[in-house]
Amino acid sequence: MRIGIIGGGAIGLLFASHLSEKHNVTLYTHTSEQASIIQRDGIRLIEDGESRLLTGIISKGLDEGISDVDLLIMAVKQYHLPQILPRIKGIQVPLLFLQNGYGHISYLKQLQSPTIYVGVVEHGALKHDGNTVEHTGLGITKVASYKGELEQLSLLNERIDHFPFKMSEDFHSMLMDKLVVNAVINPLTAILNVENGGLITNSFYYQLFQELFEEISVFWKFKIRLSHLNM
């Protein structure tokens, strides 16, 4: 499969690294400088304490235009999407959006592609420089269809067992579940200055975790009902 990835951040570099093992990957970056570095030197992936260089990835500046892809993945922050949308509005190939939150869903109605997916990334990734990414936590990528048949993504799972994709039936629930988790864990770990596991092992922290989770869950269940009614 010919896969295009927009975004040279941690997630874009991570996905380009792993998907290039079985697919032809083109990474579209915001700057031509980063594209030149990757095109010349490849992407360095740090994983399990080891570093390896991947040189089979094509990299281009986004200004060069997007062409010859079977799937286009948007791996940019949600607030960067308004700048990207004019470039992909008329594209007819399947599109996959990998943004946190739910705000990007409102943008998808502008797109002409008959097949649009949304995804939730549970991997940990850290960008060290323009062409170096560290895979800091192994997880999965959950994907659901916003529009079109989900079966078209089955090739992503082909023989890449260490970088799995899991298909979800309902994109509303999938995104909301992730959003609730982020809304609970991220502020608590920041305020309390603890890692994720510390919220469970400490009884006081765990009580705060449960109370905040319950409060946010009630709110988002209400939001889900509203979103279904407005579709």
Image (spheres, rainbow, N blue to C red):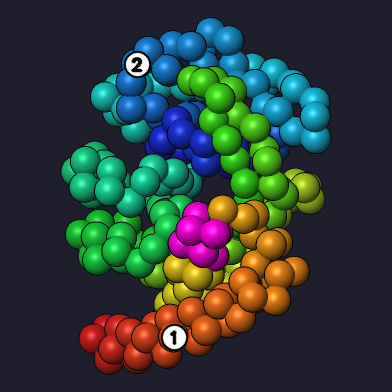
> In the image, what residue occupies the spot 43% across and 58% down?
100
Type of amino acid under label 2: Ser
The alpha-carbon separation of the residues under discs 1 and 2 comes to 45 Å
Outermost residue toward the front?
Answer: 204
Label located before the other in sequence (1 or 2): 2
The quadrant in which the N terminus is found is top right
Type of secondary structure dominating the magenta stretch: helix
Q: Is residue 67 magenta?
A: no
Q: Residue 151 sits in which quadrant?
A: bottom right
Residue 173 seen from this side: no
> Of circles 1 and 2, which is in front?
1
Residue 89 position, x and y percent, is 23, 49
Span of residues in magenta: 185-192
> In the image, what residue occupies the spot 77% across and 47% down?
162
> In the image, what residue occupies the spot 56% across and 25% down?
128
User: Residue under circle 2?
Assistant: 32
> In the image, what residue occupies the spot 75% across and 69% down?
201
Residue 17 position, x and y percent, is 63, 32
